[in-house]
Amino acid sequence: MEYDFDRVYDRTGTDSAKWNRHGPGILPMPVADMDFPSAPPIINALRARVDHGFFGYGYAREDFHQAFTARLKRRMDWDVSNDALIPIPGVIPGFNMALRAFTQPGDGVLVQLPSYPPILNAHKNHGLVRADALLVRNQDGRYEIDWESFEAAIDERTKTFILCNPHNPVGRVFTRAELERMASICLQRGLLIISDEIHCDLMMEGNRHIPIASLSPEVEARTITLMAPSKTFNLAGLKASVAVIPNEELRQQFEAARGGLVGAVNVLGYIAMTAAYAECDPWLDALLPYLTANRDYVTSYVRERMPGVSVYPSEGTYLGWLDCNGLGLPGNDPHEFFLEQAKVALGHGPDFGEQGTGFVRLNYGCPRAILEEGMNRLARAIEQRNTAT
């Protein structure tokens, strides 16, 4: 079946947080929300469920569990039992539930910087101390794990490590060797691993996602893995995710952390997840080359037409992490510069930690025409500034 990812849809006036936030004239490219409709099997399944006309209390049916675990085996070679799954209404609630379940105020939580803002700030919700490990850029611009800072950040207070893989915002897909070394350190130091793998399906060409829990039974027993179809199939508004916890004791503690605050996945969320995981591999297999081509377009465009800006091609996600420190902007604020001068809204680098100063995050999960318009606007703003100075 052919899928038309080049078609441009007008999402203004549709209650889209992405498209309605900044007002007319601003091209929004910040939030991780693609400008493609969801896969047809998902839309058809939702339509059939809506036509049913009843929306009372629901539950996770066996076909959902089977679809999810079969897909883990099919695409990631990870064998997981149906009992290991806990549906939850979001990955952010998931890692906060885990921190609530497995830490006490004053404990430490290890994170890698720069970091997705809800991970960066999760410690504040639980009275924890954030322990910072760094991702550092090599000469090619690729981010690598600073192993010295990773180990040095862990002390007797540190109880958990929140891993983000694929990494948001830098776009790294960690290798087996990197995952094994991180897991080994966590096991040796007694840290529970909370792994945010929401972007796990979004592999650019030549990369493969390895769930850290799949490395060994020992690692699996000390890991809570969080996944969702929301980024892959553009379903964030349905609030449907899954925690994979093979260790029964951890699973019970995690469930107890709901505490009357974290509810169930809604009935339409279950329908969408089941269709996504059971029927949408062909759609995803068509999407990934399109995203890879968009990634390559951004990389080439930046190198050829945006002096003072650099980007390393992301290995996963549909997010570009643009280093604009070379532009020499007043206040080193490319977010404000591009918003005002290019009328393009991008992700604000410092929101991801101080390591994001001078950076912006760009979403290339969109039709090529939108991407080209956005990149041309950015380049013109730089050219006009350089001409004026």
Image (tube, helix red, strand yellow):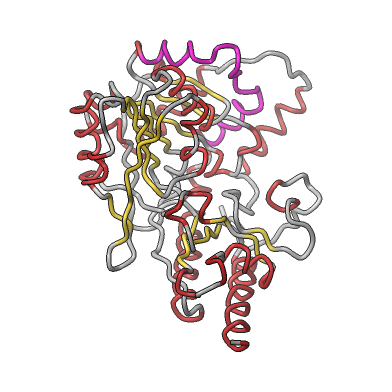
Q: Main secondary structure of the magenta part?
A: helix
Instruction: Identify the residue at image location x=77%, y=27%.
Output: 51
Where is residue 42, by image quadrant?
top right
Task: Pinpoint residue 116: horizontal percent, then vertical percent.
Answer: 48, 44
Where is residue 347, by image quadrant?
bottom right
Task: Pinpoint residue 30: horizontal percent, then vertical percent.
Answer: 60, 55
- Left or right position of 323 against 78: right
In which quadrant will I find the C terminus?
Answer: bottom right
Depicted 134 relative to depicted 261: above or below: below
Task: Pinpoint residue 181: horizontal percent, then vertical percent.
Answer: 20, 40
In this view, the residue in front, 233 or 316, is: 316
In this view, the residue in front, 140 or 265, is: 140
Instruction: Identify the residue at image location x=47%, y=64%.
Output: 322
Q: Is residue 25 magenta?
A: no
Q: Is residue 267 magenta?
A: yes
Task: Pinpoint residue 272: horizontal percent, then vertical percent.
Answer: 60, 32
Where is residue 334, by image quadrant?
bottom right
Tally of numbered discs: 0
Magenta extent: 250-277
Depicted 12 relative to depicted 58: above or below: below
Instruction: Identify the residue at image location x=48%, y=43%.
Output: 281
Instruction: Identify the residue at image location x=41%, y=33%.
Output: 71
- Left or right position of 174 against 180: right
